[in-house]
Amino acid sequence: MFTVNKTECQGCGVCMEHCLRGAIDVIDGTAHIDHDLCNDCGTCMEVCPCDAITRAAPVVAPPREIVLPRPAQPVQTGRLAAAGATLVAVGAQALPHVLDLLNAYLARRVAVRQPQGLPISGGAGIHRRRRMRQGRRNRRM
């Protein structure tokens, strides 16, 4: 984003002539930049004979402090830690069984979808379609 120093601007209009987007107008002897049209190319700043156009410093919002609500009752950390440890232990024992069940289920689905002995891709069906297309071509001649 660019700004015009009103005291240094002489209103010569050189910047307005060189602006490709038409974002600069000279009003009452001073250049005004329409920031909605400006694409921040910097041509105006380069051609200004009196160096009245400068790049504005970016506005950085200060970091906001995140305030978390406090619980109504204090959390009993000893019981919470024990409950978490119990869940981890049960999950570690149950995970291999769950994975075995999932693997068996997926193996059954693949076996049902693809019967033994048939090729995975195309197969004989593609050859039949080719013969049918060739037959159509022969009929046209």
Image (cartoon, rainbow, N blue to C red):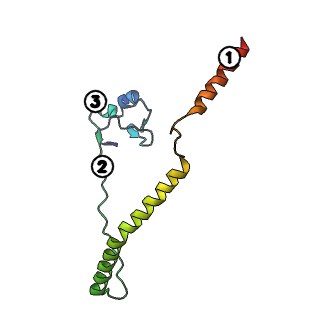
Q: Secondary structure at mark 2?
A: loop
Residue under the image location 47 percent in, 56 percent down: 106
Q: How many marks?
A: 3
Q: Earlier in the sequence, mark 1 or mark 3?
A: 3
Which amino acid, by three-letter code, is at mark 2? Pro
Quick check: 121 above or below 104?
above
Describe residue 109's horizontal placement relative to residue 84 as left or right: right
Q: Which label lies toward us, 2 or 3? A: 2
Which amino acid, by three-letter code, is at mark 1? Arg
Q: Position of residue 76 (x, y in %)?
A: 30, 87
Asked where in the image residue 4 lies, by quadrant, the reply is top left
Q: Earlier in the sequence, mark 2 or mark 1?
A: 2
Circle 1 is placed at which residue position?
A: 137
Residue under the image location 28 percent in, 31 percent down: 46
Residue under the image location 34 percent in, 43 percent down: 1
Asked where in the image residue 102 lies, by quadrant, the reply is bottom left
Most foreground residue, 119 or 95? 119
Which amino acid, by three-letter code, is at mark 3? Pro
Circle 2 is placed at which residue position?
A: 58
Circle 3 is placed at which residue position?
A: 49
Q: Separation of disc 1 and disc 3 at Cα?
A: 76 Å
Quick check: 55 above or below 43?
below
Most foreground residue, 115 or 82? 115
Residue under the image location 41 percent in, 38 percent down: 38
Quick check: 78 above or below 104?
below
Q: Secondary structure at mark 3?
A: loop
Q: Separation of disc 2 and disc 1 at Cα?
A: 69 Å
